[in-house]
Amino acid sequence: MKFALLVASAAAIQIQGDACVSNKEAGAIFNAVDTNGNGQVSKDELVKALKAYAKSRDYEPTKEDWAWVAKSAYADAGADKTLNRAEFTKWVNQFANHFHIDGCGNWSL
């Protein structure tokens, strides 16, 4: 299952230079989330992946969590309302920082 890669990748995130999630790691996560393989992560793909990730961590996202995800992903997505690989890489670093995933959040963007 592709979400297993997302969970494994997100669980292995470490602080690396200016970004918490390396380009290589972000690419692997992007490929797992882009389930239709069109090179874009849609709202539906992102929500499905985040629900699977939250479940893997036994976490129930709050309304505030979803509001932050919507606001930040929409801001990074641009006019087409999807995240390409570069936009996703930027966003996934913000996500890891915001939610303090595996030591992230101790640096500034």
Image: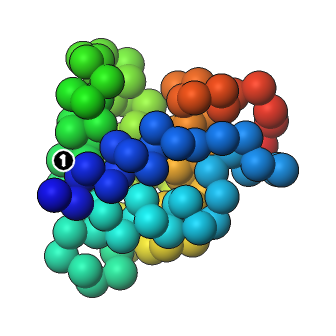
Location of residue 85 with respect to 53 vertically, above or below: below
- Residue at mark 1: 48
Q: Secondary structure at mark 1?
A: helix
Residue 79 in which image quadrant: bottom left
Q: Estimate the x, y position of residue 20 in percent, counting from the top left.
A: 68, 45
Report if residue 102 is visible in the image. Answer: yes
Q: Residue at x 80, y 33 (%)?
A: 107
Q: Residue at x 45, y 50 (%)?
A: 9
- Which colour scheme appears in the figure? rainbow
Location of residue 55 with respect to 38 vertically, above or below: above
Residue 52 as seen in the image, left or right of residue 108: left
Q: Estimate the x, y position of residue 37 in percent, counting from the top left.
A: 25, 80
Q: Label 1 amino acid?
A: Lys
Q: Estimate the x, y position of residue 104 in percent, counting from the top left.
A: 66, 31
Q: Residue at x 45, y 73 (%)?
A: 84
Residue 12 as seen in the image, left or right of residue 30: right
Q: Estimate the x, y position of residue 90 in percent, counting from the top left.
A: 60, 57
* The C terminus lies in quadrant: top right
Tag count: 1
Location of residue 105 with respect to 37 vertically, above or below: above
Q: Looking at this rendering, what residue extends furthest in the bottom direction?
A: 38
Report if residue 41 is visible in the image. Answer: no
Work out whether residue 1 or residue 107 is closer to the camera in this orientation and state it.
1
